[in-house]
Image: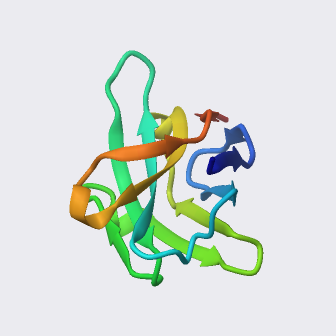
């Protein structure tokens, strides 16, 4: 029932900040006990979990990306946003938002379709 949709620029210049928003319908981002994650997949590589924001607003980021990652939400719009700063070509990937539950670890029951982001000058 729940649907997720990523949106944001498909092209970002090096050193700038990548910003993507996930709009959720059919369910509330404040519903206990869901978590709302961002995951990415570079070309030819596997999925990489970036981090999540929980139903209560708590955030937790991958250690490898923590220094560059910020997530926040707008509960009135049922949206959550990823900001990844100081991007390089290595950040080129298809980015997904997904719903999970803290108790289930890094497993997800709903995914957006993904959006391609290319970092290039």
Q: Is residue 22 left or right of residue 60?
A: right
Q: Position of residue 2 (x, y in %)?
A: 62, 51
**Could you tell me how many numbered marks the image carries?**
0
Is residue 4 or residue 92 the one in the foreground?
A: 4
- Quadrant in which the C terminus is drawn: top right
Q: Is residue 25 left or right of residue 1?
A: right
Is residue 71 or residue 13 the one in the foreground?
A: 71
Q: Quadrant of residue 51?
A: bottom left
Is residue 83 or residue 53 the one in the foreground?
A: 53
Q: Position of residue 48 (x, y in %)?
A: 33, 40
Q: Quadrant of residue 21?
A: bottom right
Q: Quadrant of residue 102?
A: bottom left
Q: Position of residue 4 (x, y in %)?
A: 64, 48
Name the residue furthest front: 1
Query: In the figure, 120 relative to 77: above or below?
Result: above
Which residue is at a point 39% across and 72% down the rendered structure image?
Answer: 33
Q: Is residue 45 visible?
A: yes
Query: In the figure, 13 relative to 92: above or below?
Result: below
Q: Position of residue 55 (x, y in %)?
A: 47, 76
Q: Is residue 70 left or right of residue 1?
A: left
Which residue is at a point 69% across and 57% down the rendered structure image?
Answer: 26
Q: Is residue 63 visible?
A: no
Which residue is at a point 44% across and 70% down the rendered structure image?
Answer: 53
Query: In the figure, 28 relative to 20: above or below?
Result: below
Is residue 51 or residue 98 the one in the foreground?
A: 98
Which residue is at a point 43% across and 44% down the rendered structure image?
Answer: 109
Name the residue furthest top: 44
């Amino acid at each position: 029932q729940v649907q997720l949709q990523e949106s944001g620029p498909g092209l970002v210049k090096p050193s700038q900040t990548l910003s993507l928003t996930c709009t959720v319908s059919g369910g509330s981002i404040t519903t206990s006990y869901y978590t709302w994650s961002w995951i990415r997949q570079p070309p030819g590589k596997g999925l990489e979990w970036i981090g999540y924001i929980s139903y209560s607003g708590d955030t937790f980021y991958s250690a490898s990306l923590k220094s560059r990652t910020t997530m926040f939400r707008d509960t009135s719009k049922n949206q959550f946003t990823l900001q990844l700063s100081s991007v390089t070509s290595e950040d080129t990937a298809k980015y997904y938002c997904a719903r999970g539950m803290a108790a289930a670890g890094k497993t997800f029951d709903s995914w957006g379709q993904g959006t391609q982001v290319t970092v290039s000058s």
